[in-house]
Amino acid sequence: TLEDSAGAVDHFFQLSLQKAVWRYLVLGVYGSYERADYAGSQQVDQRTKVGATGEYYFNPITSAYVRYEHTDFFSTPDPSGDFVEDEIKIGIKLRR
């Protein structure tokens, strides 16, 4: 939300590739770009992300995964809200 703005027009683009390296291992990479242009304001937020994923399937119910994501966020006209973020997630998925 932004004071004195009715909202934003948001454009989001993503490209993702996945490959089953072995029968039980799936690796992937992705990249995305997002731009939010606020109505009635000169503020424009832009976000780019790149990441990599891996998932190993022990059986049809259980898998382990890892994900890395790098984010760059830019905002105009005030760059004080800009940030860079690196995130790593590791976990186990259980399916029914």
Image (spheres, grey):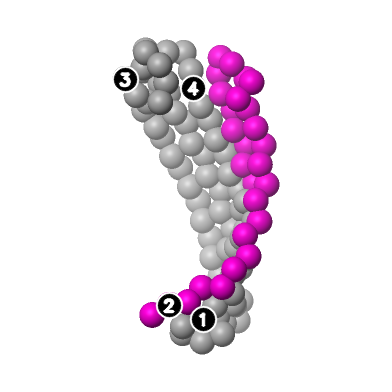
Q: Residue at x 31, y 20 (%)?
A: 6
* Magenta segment: 70-96
Residue 44 badge: 4
Amino acid on which the number 2 mark rests in the picture: Arg
Disc 3 and disc 1: Cα gap in Å?
Answer: 45 Å
Residue 20 seen from this side:
no
N-terminal-most mark, 3 or 2:
3
N-terminal-most mark, 1 or 4:
4
Disc 1 on helix, strand or loop?
strand
Disc 3 and disc 2: Cα gap in Å?
Answer: 41 Å
Q: Residue at x 43, y 39 (%)?
A: 12
Residue 6 badge: 3
Q: Residues within 10 Å of mark 1 (few under 14, many from 20)?
A: few
Q: Residue at x 65, y 32 (%)?
A: 83
Residue 74 badge: none
Q: Residues within 10 Å of mark 4 (few under 14, many from 20)?
A: some
**Residue that numbered label 1 is attached to:** 62
Q: Residue furthest left?
A: 6
Q: Residue at x 59, y 16 (%)?
A: 78
Marks 1 and 2: in contact by CB < 8 Å?
yes
Amino acid on which the number 1 mark rests in the picture: Thr
The residue nearer to you, when weighing 79 against 11, is: 79
